[in-house]
Structures are given as structure tokens and as C-alpha cells.
Amino acid sequence: MATPNAKYLALVDELAEHDRRYYVDAAPTISDGEYDALLRHLRELEAAHPAWIVPWSPTQRVAPLPASGFTKVVRERPMLSLDNTYNPGELTAFVDRIVKTLGAEATVSYVVEPKIDGFGIELTYKEGLLALGTTRGDGTVGEDITSNLKTVQGVALRLREPVDITVRGEVYIAKAEFAKINEARAASGEELFKNPRNLAAGSIKLLDAREVAQRPMQTILYELVDGDAGITSHHASIARLATLGLPTNRHNALAHSLDELLAHVASWESRRDSLPYEIDGLVIKVDSYEQRAELGTTSKFPKWAIAYKFPARQVTTLVRELEINVGRTGAITPVAILEPVDVSGTTVSRVSLHNWDQVARLGIGAGDRVLIEKAGEIIPQVLGVTEASTQPRFVPPAACPTCGTALVREDEKVVLICPNRVGCPAQRLAAIEFFGSRGQLNIDGLGEKIVAAIIAAGYVRDVADLFALTVEQLEGLERFGKLSATNLVTAIAHARETATASRLLSALGIANVGGVVAGLIMKPYGKLSTLRNRVAATDREAMVAELCAIDGVGEVIAQSVDAFFRDPDSLEIVDKLISHGVDPAEPVKAAATGALSGQIFVITGTLSKPRAEVAADIEAAGGTVAGSVSKKTNYLVAGADTGKSKLDAATKHGTKVLDEAALGALIAGDVPQS
């Protein structure tokens, strides 16, 4: 007779199998929507029957509270290091030593594995359940990070069979995810992470497993340490791990001779960039366990394995000069112009230094020889000066390079700003391009070159002038014919007809005001002209207080909006827009009822779809979306690259942190609100 929770247990197993197919095999067999429906049903069962919940349920990956520290764990079989080899000659010598020990008549096969540049871990399963997860530590003594490792996708909470085994592997962050995280840090003026390995290592040892869960980490397991004694070879053990539902490397290969081994190694020199994660070489292992035992180990290294290290992906080159770029918001970004150099197959001649604090940290100047690498094999960055020249060090400019306005640095910010928003040519071009971009006014065909052409012709000084353009004016420009001129004027007219007040406010590029915040602000005011007139009729202190009274609008945002509508140049643009008939109303949404009624959310980080769409989903379920975390905020929806400040604010105010999947469950009413 089936037990009362039999269907629940079957559902847990079904979801675990789908997780394995998605995260281990990269071959899902159901859609995200179907998976989410199964997960919602699981949460319904767990909410109704909390006594049924098992430790290997996919809902149990994240611990509810931060750990106070990590317990030391002494392992019986140390995690030894590997000796290194750097060229085919040294690899041949390694094979010769093995043949000499085993005898010329012995048949030796080798496993060739990509050496992931990650963070070493060991997992212990008891009766198929994850019992312990540890760091490598010094090889013999590691730290218990089980709660954190449960958050890493690919780390199975329960195996397909109730076996006792211990396995080792690497936790890593994919190159694309690493690039996203560093791009976000650069935008906020934070120091960049040096490489994915350091980020993975730092992330996996955070004390709060909830914060660990926000980092997009994965794992690949490469060694069966203990258990399944009947297995006699390494490649058979890896196959066994795969049958148990654990992630293994599909790029592993067997070589049955030195020639085959050298051929495999040579092939990886050009193939390494095709992998989604960083590798710094290959691991070569004798396949036979019996032969491994005969070869033995030294005090530091196994004699049956070696690492073949690829040449460093770092190069040095000379700094020619410093270019100073002016962005849409007036941010002054230093860019090093380099003697062109090949880095990982790409010619690099310019590298952003991000901000002037970073320039000072590097102590960089013209003529210096600098060390360059591609962070995450994607974004070139300067790691440091290897040989300084006698020329002066680069220092921040005092004035904007395009308009000559004195630069300012806002309190507690690392970015220098040109305050001449309207008169600065560089800001003008970037502002007009941004105004017409997708997600703002979405004016089809208004790219950078077109914007530059209409500015150079004197037809457009600011975004409002776009709505006065005529076909006759455009026809006279080099890049336009009758049809292209008509198409652009038509696209501008369409943008005027379809715009909303919040999209218009966001498109104006006010500091700290994105699409979600613009929607919050325009909800009570309705139209740009109403907000403009309200600011004009209200003193500064009262206006900031009035804006702060809007849920989700903090003082920094309120001050930005107030300052914009008091600036004469900004007011001129707003008044011109209104005179051109660009003053749309904000659509009035019927009050939504649903699972999120009365709940306030803040959205941050990189999600699977634009934040505006996530906000719409929340609002459709009756929730409210705010721009910053406050004591009123119920939930912080956090994506992969969530900044520390938002998480700190959530901790301070007791705000619950959700990932995207948990939000979906909450919208469906599957998780009790707290």
C-alpha cells in the first residue's frame, strides 16, 4: 500500500531528475513553464504537509540563516596537489617515468581532462544523501561548507542510488556570468574581480548561504575518492558518477599511447576558448587504479597524474596615451590606448580603466609596460604596471575634454562628472541616442551615426528638437534619401503617439531614474507637465519630501528629480517637448488583486527578462514595485549580479530575499507570505 506522502516523494524525485537534465546534461526535457508548475505543486504539498519535507527536496537548497563560521574537517585521504608540466617534452618525460616504473610491457591508458580554473571541493554522500561538503583547505584539513554547496546548481542533494561515496570537483563561475558581474561593478564604481576563480572562491565561503545563492556558480566533479570498490578504472568511475546524477565533464578523453596523448593536448590549445568556463590546462591521469597503486605518491603529488599547464593568457604591452571619454550622464571614463597586442586571439588596443580611483591604484602613465589579460576571456583589463616609464603619471582632468566645464565629484562617488548636461557635445549625442533607444522612446533608425549627422547639421540640439525634424531637412544630409528620411520622421511621430509619461521621464536620463522608478513617480502625477508645474510651485525641501512619500522613492532619487526640474536647461527641454505635443498621460491601471496584494517589492540584479517585465508580473498579481529597499519593503527580488548594498539594506530592514523562481512561486500563491 502506498504511503500518504508517496506522490510527494515521487514529485521530489521527478524535479531532481529535471534539475539533473538541465544543470548536468544541459538537455532539459520539459519547458521552464512546465518545471515551474511542478515546483509550485511541490510547494503546495509542503505548505499543506510540512512534516513530509525531506532534506533533498529542491526547496531546501538555501539555509534560512547565516552561519556563524565554518567547522574544520580532517579528511582521511588528503587532496594532493598536482605536479606541473608546460610543454610536450616535459609531458613525454612524465610518460617515460611511468613506463619505467610499470615496465615496458605494460599497457597504459591515460585520461585527459580539462583543468577547470575553479575552487576545489569534496562531497560526501551517505546512503545517497549529501552529508558533507568541504573546501580543499590545506589538503588534509578543510572547512564544512555544506549549506553553501547546497545552493550550487549541479550539486545533487540526493543520488539516484542509496550509496556511500566521496567525490571531488571544482566550483566555478562561467565566463559570461563573470563578465556580467564585472560590468555591473564597473558601472557602480566598484573594484573589479580579477578572475572567475577568485570570485568563485570568495563566493563559496560567504557565511550567508542566501547570499551565496545569488552567485551563479556551477560544479563539475572529476574524482571518485571512496565507495564503489568494484570499479577498476578512472574513466569507469566517472561514468558511474554520471549514472548517479552527478555532473561530470563531457570533454574527458582516453589516450592509449604517447602519440594519442600529445595529439589530445595539442588539440586543446585551440579548443579552450570554446568552453563556457575558464581552464588553465589539462589534467593527465593514469586510468587504471591498479597501476595507480603501483606508481604511488610523493608527500605532495600523485605519481600517476600531472597538470599540463597552458601558456599564460596574460601579455604585456606599452601604454601610448590616455583617452578621456564622456558618457551620457557626464561620467568621465579614462581609457588606456595601448600598443596593439594579441590577447587570447583578439587584438587589444584600448582598455577601460573605469574610474580615476582605479587609475591611482595602478599608478599608470604613458610609456609604461602593463600586464593585460581578458577577464573571463571576454573583457580586456589592465592588471598592473610591470615597468614604469619616466613620464608623469596620469591624473584626473580638471575640465571636461569636450566642453571645458569644470568637473565635479559627487559625495562618496568615485566617478568624475561633467555637470554641463545640455551644452556638452558628447553628452548631447549620447543623451539623444539614449532617448530614442529600445526601452525608452524606441525610435527606429535613430542610431549613433544618424544622431551625429543631425547634430552636425544643426537641426537637433536636444531631444525635443527631434520632434521638429522634417523630411526636407533630412533629405539634404549625406546618409539620407527620400525613403530613409520619411521613415525616420514617421518613426519619431510613432514614438510621440505611443509614449507613456513614465517612458518619457525615464528617457530623459535623470540620474537614478530608470523605467521602474519612473513608473512609480508618474503614477501620482500622470503627466510630465503636471510634475514640472508641481516642482515649480513647491519649495525644494517640500518637493523632496513629497517625492519621498511615494513608496519606493528614496531621498537620493527625489533629489535627482527635483534638481532636474529646477535646472534651466532641463526645463527648456521639457517645455519644448510639451510644446511639440510630447506630454503623454500615464496609463491608469486598474487595481490588481492577487497573491501579492499589499506587498512591496524591489527588483535588482540581472534576471532572465527585463526588470520592467518582472515589475509588470508583480503588479499584475497585486504587488507594488519600489525603487529602493526600505523598512516598508517586503521582498527584494535579486538577480545574479546583485550588489552588496542592496543585500545589506535587506538585512538591515529584515526584507526577505527572493530569486526569480521563488518570485514565480510567490505570484502563484505557493509560498506563505511573511
Image (cartoon, rainbow, N blue to C red):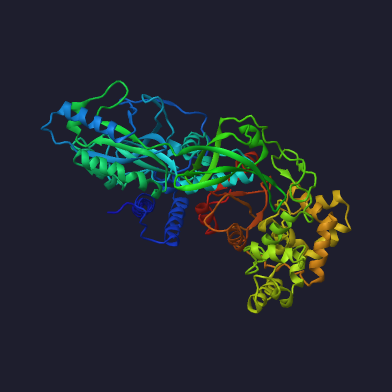
* Percent of width and height locating residue 98: 20, 29
Quadrant of the rendering where the N terminus is positioned? bottom left
Q: In the image as oriented, which residue stretches furthest toward the top?
A: 299
Q: What residue is rendered at 74% in x and 66% in y?
A: 457
* Residue 445 falls in image quadrant: bottom right
Q: Residue at x 35, y 50 (%)?
A: 20
In this orientation, which residue lies closer to the viewer: 303 or 143? Answer: 303
Placement of 561 over or under 297, stated as above or below: below
Q: Where does residue 479 sit, x and y in percent of width and height?
A: 64, 70
* Residue 312 placement (x, y as % from top left): 43, 36
- Above/below status of 362 relative to 403: above
Q: Seen in the image, is 252 located left or right of residue 612?
A: left
Q: Count how many numbered circles sit on residues in the image.
A: 0
Q: Residue 301's quadrant in the figure?
A: top left
Q: Could you tell me residue 283's position as x and y percent?
A: 31, 36
Tell me if residue 354 can be seen. yes
Q: Nearer the viewer, residue 587 or 472?
A: 472
